[in-house]
Amino acid sequence: MSLPRTPAFRLDGRRAFVPGGTRGIGLACAAALAQAGAHVTVAARTPAQVSEAVSALRDAGHEAEGAPLDVSDLTALDGFLDARDGFDIMCNSAGIARHGPALDTTPEDFDAVTGLNLRAAYFLAQRVARRMTQGGSIIQISSQMGHVGGIDRAVYCATKHGVEGMTKAMAIEWGPRNIRVNTICPTFIRTPLTEGTFNDPERRAWIDEKIKLPRVGEVEDIMGPVVFLASDAAAMITGTSILVDGGWTAG
C-alpha cells in the first residue's frame, strides 16, 4: 500500500509581492514567505522603511527586493507591475485605521480608510491577478473585524467586511484560472501600532475578555497561515478566511 504524501509547504522558485511588508504584520508575512523559499518583493510608501526591511531580509540570507510605492496610486502600481515578470503570490498587508465613534466619523477619515483598505486592496488583487498567467495565490490581510463589529470601528469594520465579500467573489471568478483568493483575519496583534490600544486599561480588558486563549496575538501567529495559504498545501482552499483570533468570533 502506498501512502499519500503531504503537499509541500515550501515556496522555492516562487515570487511573492508583499505590499505593506515593511513593519508589523506585513514584515512578518514577508519574512515567513522568504523563510519558506520565496523571492520576496516588499513595497511601502516610505523609502527608508523599504530599505530597512529589504536589508533585514537579505542579512538573514533571503532573496528580497523592494520599492517605495503608494498602492492606492493605480498609475504607479501599474508601472511597478509592468516592470516585473509577475508574481506567484501576493500578500497584501497595506492598511490603515482611524478609530472613533461612528457619530464622529468625518468624510475625510472615511475616504482615507476605505481608499486604502478597500479600494486599493481591490485593485491590487485585480492587477496582480491579470498577470498571474500560471495561477497563483492572493492573500488579503483582513481582520476579525471583517466578521464582527467592534467599539469605535464602524469604518474599519465596513472596509474589512468589504474585503471578505470581494474575496469570495474574486475566488469564484478566478478559480478557473487557478488563482486562489483568501483572507487571514487576525485579532489584536501586538505591534508598535497597537501599543496604544494595549496600554488602555479599558480596551485591554475588552480584548482579554473576548480572546478565549490566555494571551494576545503576536506577529508570529500570522506567519504559519500565510505560508500555508501561499503553498501547495492549500491548493484546494479558496474564497475563505483563516481566523487567527484566539476564539474571538467563536462567541
Image: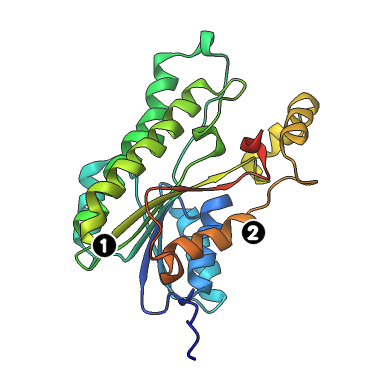
Q: Position of residue 227 (x, y in %)?
A: 50, 65
The mark lying in front, picked from 1 and 2, is 1
Going by the numbered disc 1, the residue's amino acid type is Asn
Q: Position of residue 204 (x, y in %)?
A: 76, 32
Compare marks 1 and 2 and give the one earlier in the sequence.
1
Residue that appears at 53% across and 79% down: 61
Residue that appears at 49% across and 76% down: 62
* Circle 2: element type: helix
Q: CA distance from mark 1 to mark 2?
A: 28 Å
- The residue under label 1 is 178
Query: Along the horizontal axis of the image, is 165 left or right of 214?
Result: left
How many residues crowd mark 2 within 10 Å: few (<14), some (14–19), many (20+)? some
Q: Position of residue 197 (x, y in %)?
A: 69, 32
Q: How is the image coloured?
A: rainbow
* Circle 1: element type: loop
Going by the numbered disc 2, the residue's amino acid type is Glu
Circles 1 and 2, Cβ within 8 Å, touching? The answer is no
- The residue under label 2 is 220
